[in-house]
Image (cartoon, rainbow, N blue to C red):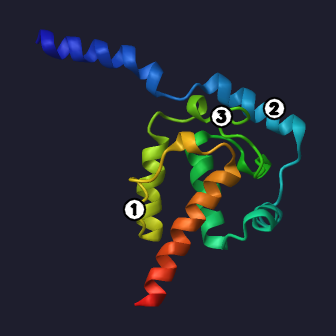
Amino acid sequence: MWRQLKNTLNSVRTYPDLSPDLQVRRQVNRQLRSQRPALKPEDWYYEFRLITRCDQRLLDFLHSRLQHYSGLNFSRVRPCDHLVDDLQFPLVCWFDWAWKLCEDFERVFGVDISEDFDETQFDTVKDLLVFLDRRVSTRQAAIAHC
């Protein structure tokens, strides 16, 4: 009985460290809203495609998953936005967002990136997208070779 109570208390103490900071999330969304207009989906995709040449499926994935993990309005996010400095990803996301991204990426694209993925490697949204695009391209090239 004491062990169960102790586990519950530890869970309550740990929860704030693992969960998103909703105040920071609102602040980042407010800042994005004040700095730039929301883009229509086709304009958002066009802007990202100009810089990375990624296909629509990967852009759809990136937009929906990162918006889901962060709670940020991704129609206002641009390729040059810094994941930490501008978007505050470590604070606005659940602690396991990177693990979920790897899991979702494998489910959607059939590519396991968990061995190579380190969210601290990526400065900007563009950096993350380029990494994901290379993994998809490598997989497609391997399939075409068979």
Q: Is 10 situated left or right of 145 in this image?
A: left
Packing grade of label 2 (10 A; few <14, some 14-19, many >=20) is: some
Asked which secondary structure carries label 2, the reply is helix
| Residue 57 versus residue 73 in the image, above or below | below
| Residue 141 versus residue 127 in the image, above or below | below
Label 1 vs label 2, nearer the camera: 1
Asked which secondary structure carries label 3, the reply is loop
Q: Give the residue displayed 71% in from the left and 49% down from the top.
A: 74
Label 2 vs label 3, nearer the camera: 3
Residues marked 1 and 2 touching at CB (< 8 Å): no
Q: Give the residue displayed 42% in from the left and 63% down from the top.
A: 106
Residue that badge 1 annotates: 112
Task: Name, please, the residue furthest toward the left.
Answer: 1
Q: Give the residue displayed 69% in from the left and 36% down from the top.
A: 87
Mark positioned earlier in the residue sequence (1 or 2): 2
Q: Position of residue 83 (x, y in %)?
A: 66, 40
* Residue type at the position of mark 2: Gln
Residue that badge 2 annotates: 31
Mark positioned earlier in the residue sequence (2 or 3): 2
Mark positioned earlier in the residue sequence (3 or 1): 3
Q: CA distance from mark 3 to mark 1?
A: 24 Å
Q: Position of residue 19 (x, y in %)?
A: 48, 28
Residue that badge 3 annotates: 84
Residue 18 badge: none
Q: Is 8 situated left or right of 55 in this image?
A: left
Residues marked 3 and 1 touching at CB (< 8 Å): no
* Residue type at the position of mark 1: Asp
* Residue type at the position of mark 3: Val
